Image (tube, grey):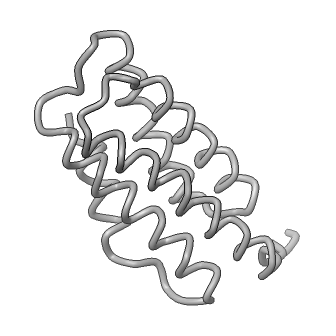
Amino acid sequence: MSKKTPPDPELLESFAAEARRHCDVIAAGLATETTDFETMRVEAHALKGTASAVGLRRLSELAGLMESDLAEAKETGIIRGGRTHQIADAAKALAEGAAAAAAGQEEPPDVGRSLAQLFSV
């Protein structure tokens, strides 16, 4: 069995900065109640792919759940009841999780809470 190589610290720092930018776009869209769900979905999709590429599986999963809700909102024209706040919380948790990974710290508890919230129907 091969050992997993830890992600490059510079790569994690770059991802943390990128994650903050993407999450800020999502948070701003939710705060202003935009109906441009596609832009927010694309931001979440980018986060999902990059988090996966740097080996941050749980952050990738969180971004995927955000993307799914935003894709549904694009189709229906509205974010399902109560989910706006949860997606905003998830964006904040994801940015904090990326920053923690870059700093070599443990994953913040809000990442797990956001995963649990977005997994619920």
Q: Where the C terminus falls, by quadrant?
A: top left
Q: Position of residue 74 (x, y in %)?
A: 38, 16
- State the residue in front, 94 or 4: 94
Q: Quadrant of residue 81?
A: top left
Q: Position of residue 1 (x, y in %)?
A: 85, 69
Q: Residue at x 88, y 70 (%)?
A: 2
Q: Residue at x 33, y 76 (%)?
A: 109
Q: Measured along the vertical axis of the image, is residue 121 above or below residue 3?
A: above
Q: Position of residue 95 (x, y in %)?
A: 48, 66
| Residue at the farthest front position | 32
Q: Residue at x 59, y 58 (%)?
A: 57
Q: Residue at x 23, y 27 (%)?
A: 79
Q: Measured along the vertical axis of the image, is residue 92 above or below residue 68?
A: below
> Seen in the image, is 35 located left or right of residue 84?
right
- State the residue in front, 88 or 53: 88
Q: Position of residue 32 (x, y in %)?
A: 26, 40
